[in-house]
Amino acid sequence: MAPDKPKRGKTLSSIRTLLVEDNTLFRQTLREILSNQFPVLEIAEAGSGKEAWQKMAERQPDLVFMDIKLPDENGLLLTRKIKAQNPKAIVIILTSYDFPEYREAAFQYGTNHFIVKGSSSNREILDLVGSIIQGLRNGVQKEGKSSSETL
């Protein structure tokens, strides 16, 4: 009897990623951390909702890091629009606002994960992204974290 062949998942040469964050320093720091750990990420940046929507149309990202408070649009509303256009996109809300009502709203608007800035270590964020990349490579989209879980 021949051994079972390992199942092969979807091979991705790059994972299109969009960082939507109005704080330039935070956005660039996150980009550097992610780029150093995951060269497979093809990262674009947006500092506003309008810029994010434009880059969404151009790039159709697989993974989106979304701030809730943007200068010209609410990140939750933008998440809903993104998910309506591209339901397979994985959206990670990344915010300073750790309120239960924000978490609940984030999941109602379609986010997959909710991370609180300052409460999550770089390692926790990198572990989450690594898990997402593995899921994308295996053709599996992970379900979101429960609204009570904080990274």
Image (tube, rainbow, N blue to C red):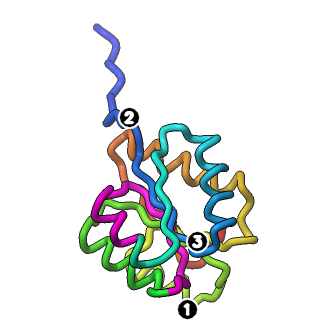
Residue farthest toward the top in the current orientation of the protein: 1
The foreground one among 31 and 109 is 31
83 with respect to 23 (left or right): left
Residue found 48% across the figure and 77% down from its top: 48
Distance of label 2 from label 3 (alpha carbons): 26 Å
**Amino acid bearing label 2:** Ser
Q: Which residue is mark 1?
A: 101
Q: Is residue 64 magenta?
A: yes
Q: Which contiguous range is marked in magenta?
A: 52-71
The first of marks 2 and 3 along the sequence is 2
Mark 1 or mark 3: whose residue is earlier in sequence: 3
User: Which dot, 1 or 2, sits closer to the camera?
Assistant: 2
Q: Which label belongs to residue 57?
A: none
The one of 63 and 27 positioned closer to us in this rendering: 27
* Amino acid type of the residue tagged 3 in the rendering: Leu
Query: Which structural element holds mark 3?
Result: strand
- Find residue 99 and report its horizontal and vertical position in percent: 63, 88
Q: Position of residue 71 (x, y in %)?
A: 52, 86
Q: Which residue is mark 3?
A: 94
Image quadrant for the N terminus? top left
Q: Position of residue 145 (x, y in %)?
A: 52, 68
Which image quarter is the C terminus in? bottom right
The residue tagged 2 is 13
